């Protein structure tokens, strides 16, 4: 699901509806104006990060905290509820986002953006829960055979081309070029592959099951271990991830002209 599509359009965009009447600093003696100004500033940060593909778990968490401050200043500001719910959708906090939108609906019952984001969050939550159910079913059905493409794993080993391809993906994700993926970079992996940011439970699972450094950052070897396990259990998911990162299921780069 494309979360940001809910808020695209001149009349539908959150940022289009938040404005202030002055260009100076809003006096703190006017909490409502202060909340509105802070909401606009925070939405500007969100917009800039989205446009530059720099949304990370760390940044999203900070933006969420800023929208919380907006609501502390003005608990009746629907824009802040809507914006915070939008951030929750990226963080995978679907229940919290839906609760925020329920409050926003009472404050702005005719705002179509709220209903549209509610629908998206409900779909994302349902999809996430169905994926969990599918994982449980797979665990219970140990006898089910999974056909793993030979171009991925052959003779119980990752193929050279598979390793080469995922080393390229790892290097793209390793923005700071320190040879490991920190939490923000892992979040970028999840955003690209799944459209939703990584949850802490997934971070914990990665740190417990794959090679990480002393700081809990995923190593290149751990990244390959992660995709080896996924490919053995659900090769179609690996194919989906390859496509998200610009490769076809045969591990070849997808031409932009296609």
Image (spheres, grey):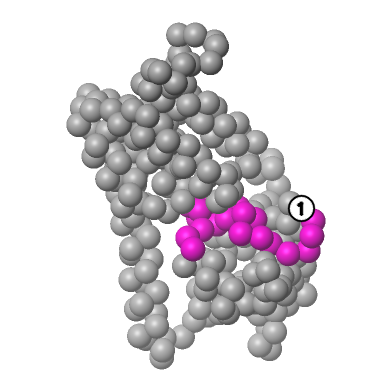
The image quarter in which residue 130 lies: bottom left
Kindly identify the residue that appears in the image at 54 percent across and 10 percent down.
23
The magenta segment: 177-200
Q: Residue at x 34, y 78 (%)?
A: 137
Asked whether, in this view, residue 49 is left or right of residue 91, the answer is right
Q: Which residue is mark 1?
A: 176
Q: Is residue 227 above or below residue 194?
A: below
Residue 34 located left or right of residue 183: left
- Residue drawn at (53%, 43%), measured in percent from left and top? 62
Q: Position of residue 65 (x, y in %)?
A: 46, 42
- Image coordinates for residue 28, horizontal then vertical, percent: 44, 21
Q: Secondary structure at mark 1?
A: loop
Assess whether residue 209 is covered by the magenta stretch. no
Could you tell me if residue 202 is visible in this image? yes
Which quarter of the figure has residue 70? top left
Image mark count:
1
Viewer-proximal residue, 95 or 256? 95
Residue 148 in view in this figure: no
Which residue is at a point 37% across and 69% down the rendered structure image? 132
Apparent side of residue 247 relative to residue 17 in the rendered image (left or right)? right
Residue 109 x, y percent position in the rendering? 20, 27
Residue 199: x and y, percent? 47, 60
């Amino acid at each position: 699901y494309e979360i940001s599509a809910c808020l695209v359009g001149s009349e539908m965009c959150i940022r289009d509806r938040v404005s202030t009447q002055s260009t100076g600093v809003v006096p703190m003696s006017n909490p409502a104006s202060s909340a509105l100004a802070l909401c606009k500033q925070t939405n500007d940060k969100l917009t800039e990060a989205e446009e530059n593909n720099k949304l990370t778990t760390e940044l999203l968490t900070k933006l969420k905290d800023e929208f919380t401050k907006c609501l502390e200043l003005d608990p009746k500001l629907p824009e802040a509820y809507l914006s915070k719910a939008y951030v929750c959708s990226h963080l995978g906090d679907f229940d919290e986002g839906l609760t925020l939108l329920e409050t926003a609906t009472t404050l702005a019952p005719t705002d179509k953006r709220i209903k549209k984001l509610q629908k998206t969050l409900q779909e994302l939550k349902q999809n996430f829960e169905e994926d969990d159910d599918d994982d449980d079913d797979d665990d219970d059905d140990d006898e089910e055979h999974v056909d793993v493409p030979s171009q991925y794993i052959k003779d119980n080993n990752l193929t050279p081309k598979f390793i080469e391809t995922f080393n390229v993906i790892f290097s793209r994700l390793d923005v700071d070029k320190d040879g490991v993926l920190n939490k923000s970079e892992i979040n970028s992996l999840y955003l690209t592959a799944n459209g939703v940011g990584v949850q802490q439970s997934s971070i914990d699972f990665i740190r417990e099951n794959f090679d990480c450094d002393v700081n809990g950052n995923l190593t290149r070897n751990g990244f390959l271990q992660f995709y080896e396990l996924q490919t053995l259990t659900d090769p179609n998911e690996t194919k989906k991830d390859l496509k998200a990162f610009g490769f076809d299921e045969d591990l070849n780069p997808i031409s932009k002209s296609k």
